[in-house]
Image: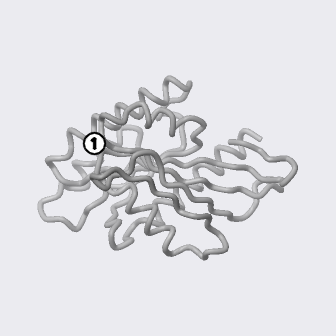
């Protein structure tokens, strides 16, 4: 959280975190395409020749007020590939809330678990823990054949019983429910700190 006293703004950072190709960038692209252009900043996407996000997608959303100050939400994705571990750490710096985007396919469970453990390790280095941090889980790709059951996904990934949502990010299903939930969690957390 960063407060700009001159503009009476609170800048809040939400990071979409998850294994490579789980749908993090797809979420942000969908959100950006549906928002009123007067509410959203430019979507910046940096990609490699493999067409995967390297650093971040960035967007600002302005909604309501927190204790008289205007919140601005900056949304980022992290690169999911393991060899971008240092980039993920940098992007998490100063994070206020997290959306963990899990791939619902059974063969991706190991990558989901590894990435979730990586997230917890990175948060601990900044003095946080998933146990007491505003975050939600999105179980993405629910439209694909043979996906894990919701019960199985919850059991393996949602060990802190945080809000969770089924999604098909390419169609927008569950995308805004996920975003609203993490925003509510971040706002409640920030209000308790101010």
Residue drawn at the location 49% of the way across and 73% of the way down: 33
Of residue 15 and residue 156, the one placed in the foreground of this image is: 15
Of residue 89 and residue 124, the one placed in the foreground of this image is 89
Q: Residue furthest front?
A: 49
22, 139: nearer the viewer: 22
Q: Is residue 189 above or below residue 178?
A: above
User: In the displayed structure, does residue 11 sit left or right of residue 166?
Assistant: right
Residue farthest to the right, as pictured: 6
Residue at x 58% of width, y 55% of height: 183
Residue position marked by numbered label 1 in the rendering: 112
Can you give x and y, in whole percent of width and height, for residue 40 in the image?
61, 67
Give how far across and how far down residue 38 sits, in percent.
67, 74
Identify the image's colour scheme: rainbow, by chain, secondary structure or one colour. Answer: one colour
Q: Residues within 10 Å of mark 1 (few under 14, many from 20)?
A: many
Q: Residue at x 38, y 55 (%)?
A: 24
Q: What secondary structure is found at the residue carrying circle 1?
A: helix
Q: Residue 167: horizontal and vertical position, in percent?
A: 34, 64
| Number of disc labels | 1
Which residue is at 45% across, 50% downward?
77
Q: Quadrant of the C terminus?
A: top right
Instruction: Give the quarter of the figure containing the N terminus.
Output: top right
Residue 155 location (% of width, % of height): 27, 43
Q: Is residue 39 left or right of residue 150?
A: right
Residue 22 located left or right of residue 95: left
């Amino acid at each position: 959280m960063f407060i700009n006293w001159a503009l009476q703004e609170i800048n809040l950072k939400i990071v979409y975190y998850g294994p490579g190709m789980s749908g993090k960038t797809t979420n942000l692209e969908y959100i950006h395409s549906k928002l009123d252009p007067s509410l959203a900043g430019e979507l910046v996407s940096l990609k490699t020749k493999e067409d995967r996000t390297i650093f971040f997608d960035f967007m600002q959303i302005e909604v309501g007020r927190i204790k008289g100050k205007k919140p601005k939400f900056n949304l980022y994705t992290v690169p999911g590939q393991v060899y971008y571990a240092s980039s993920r750490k940098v992007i998490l710096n100063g994070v206020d809330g997290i959306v963990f985007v899990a791939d619902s396919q059974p063969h991706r469970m190991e990558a989901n678990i590894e990435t979730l453990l990586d997230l917890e390790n990175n948060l601990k280095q900044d003095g946080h823990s998933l146990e007491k941090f505003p975050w939600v889980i999105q179980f993405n790709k629910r439209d694909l054949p043979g996906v894990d059951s919701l019960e199985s996904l919850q059991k393996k990934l949602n060990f802190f019983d945080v809000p969770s949502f089924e999604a098909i990010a390419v169609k927008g299903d569950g995308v805004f429910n996920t975003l609203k939930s993490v925003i509510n969690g971040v706002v409640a957390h920030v209000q308790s700190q101010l």
